[in-house]
Amino acid sequence: MHLAVFNLDHPAHYYSVGPFSISAGNATIILVMVAIFTLALFLPFPHGKGDKK
């Protein structure tokens, strides 16, 4: 049964800094979440036609 898009039959890659370690997949998810949060802070909200500043 070879229906997977990615080969998941291997050990995960880990990044270690001192006593802390995190898998590459989790680090990617965290970085994407931080990027989306930052964009949400700085991008303006859409305004309707009648709204004035």
Image: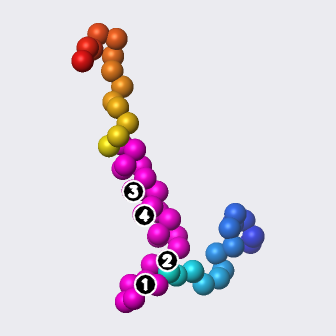
- Residue 11 in the image: x percent, y percent? 60, 84
* First reached walking from the N terminus: tag 1 or tag 3: 1
Q: How many numbered marks appear?
A: 4
* First reached walking from the N terminus: tag 2 or tag 1: 1
Instruction: For marks 2 and 3, give the CA distance.
Output: 17 Å
Contact between labelled residues 4 and 3, with CB atoms less than 8 Å apart: yes
The secondary structure that most of the magenta stretch takes on is helix
Residue type for callout 2: Ser
Q: Mark 3 = which residue?
A: 34
Residue farthest to the bottom?
A: 19
Residue farthest to the top?
A: 50
Structural crowding at the residue carrying mark 3, measured as other residues with C-alpha within 10 Å and reported as few (<14), some (14–19) or many (≥20): few
- Residue 2 in the image: x percent, y percent? 75, 70
Q: Mark 4 = which residue?
A: 30
Q: Mark 2 = which residue?
A: 23
Quadrant assignment for the N terminus: bottom right
Secondary structure found at label 2: strand
Q: Is residue 48 left or right of residue 24?
A: left
Contact between labelled residues 1 and 2, with CB atoms less than 8 Å apart: no
Q: Residue at x 52, y 81 (%)?
A: 14
Residue 17 is marked as 1
* First reached walking from the N terminus: tag 2 or tag 3: 2
Instruction: For marks 3 and 4, give the CA distance.
Output: 6 Å
Segment tinted magenta in the rendering:
16-40
Vertical arrangement, residue 35 with respect to residue 2, above or below: above
Say if the magenta span includes residue 22. Answer: yes
